[in-house]
Amino acid sequence: MTLQNVFPWILRAQQEGWAVGAFNANTLEQVQAVVLAAQIENAPAIIQVSHRALTYIGNGNEIQGLKYIAAIGKIAAESVTVPLALHLDHGTESEVLQAIALGFTSVMFDGDGLAFDENISITKRLCETAHSIGVCMEAEVGEVPKPDGKDYDESAIDLTQPDEAAQFAEATGVDTLAVALGSVHGLKTKTVSLDLDRLDAIRKRVSTPLVLHGSSGVSDKDIKQGVTMGLCKVNVATQLSQAFTNAIRDVLNKDGDVVDPRKYLAPGRNAQMEIVRERIQFLGASGKAK
Ligand SMILES: [Zn+2]
């Protein structure tokens, strides 16, 4: 297949109470882990790449990173019979435009730090461009924190206000809306609860499909409940990197003489594939490719 806009699957997930998994990748092997898992599970899936991953892939040049990943994404999609989207995660305005031009089928504009009205006006403009060529557009209201290993103040999290979410969705025409319900990016244990009453209040005001960021830190019980309540794109990143890196660490710990990168990257890829499969099953997306 070619890369797909998987928005129709997200809408179906919303109606049927499951979620499309969106899996972050930083390396070729991490892309392949998602592709292999999606094919085995016969599931729609989203490969997503963050601003920092692009900078890494492009060796400091994020546009170069976008070009690399756009090419890899096209080949990845051609290798399977399930619908795969290539998504820009947390992009700036110029990254969103570049990604659209390079063939990404889904983009997220991160208006973090902008005034509410400015976030609306930029998102609306980007939506018009994305929709003119059939690209799915995501944006965020409130903020899921990105502490990057530093401390953060839980009480200061900018949780999504239902009224603002409704106003934002209406004014921008965005396809999917990321909401802040208490999750945090980059947490290594599943200890955070979601504000499910807030999710309920948002869902009563907003028909736009909702997105959970930071799922690696959220208890599975709350993710499951959130999915039945309308979270229909769930982002998974840290859990994948944990599986990938732990498998590599095992190989290197066992054999101090290993030199060939394939000897440790293949187990990393395989371990991540198993986690992606498990998450696809957990989110109820197995068998939903058609
Ligand atoms: Zn995120």
Image (spheres, helix red, strand yellow):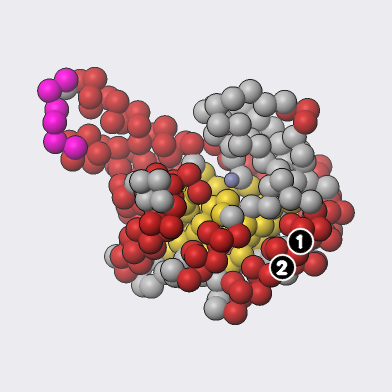
The residue that mark 1 highlights is: 120
- Residue type at mark 1? Ile
Q: Residue at x 22, y 34 (%)?
A: 264
Closer to the camera in the image, 98 or 219: 98
The residue stretch that appears in magenta: 256-261
In the image, what residue occupies the spot 69% across and 32% down? 193
Which corner quadrant holds the N terminus?
Answer: bottom left
Kindly tell me whether residue 290 is visible in this rendering: no
Rendered position, 273 above or below 101: above
- Across and down, in percent, residue 77 comes to 36, 65
Q: Are marks 1 and 2 in contact (CB under 8 Å)?
A: yes
User: Residue 66's spot in the image, x, y percent?
Assistant: 42, 58
Callout 2, which amino acid? Lys
Residue beneath disc 2: 124
Residue ranking furthest to the bottom? 132
Specify the quarter for ligand 1.
top right
Q: Nearer the viewer, residue 195 or 76?
A: 76
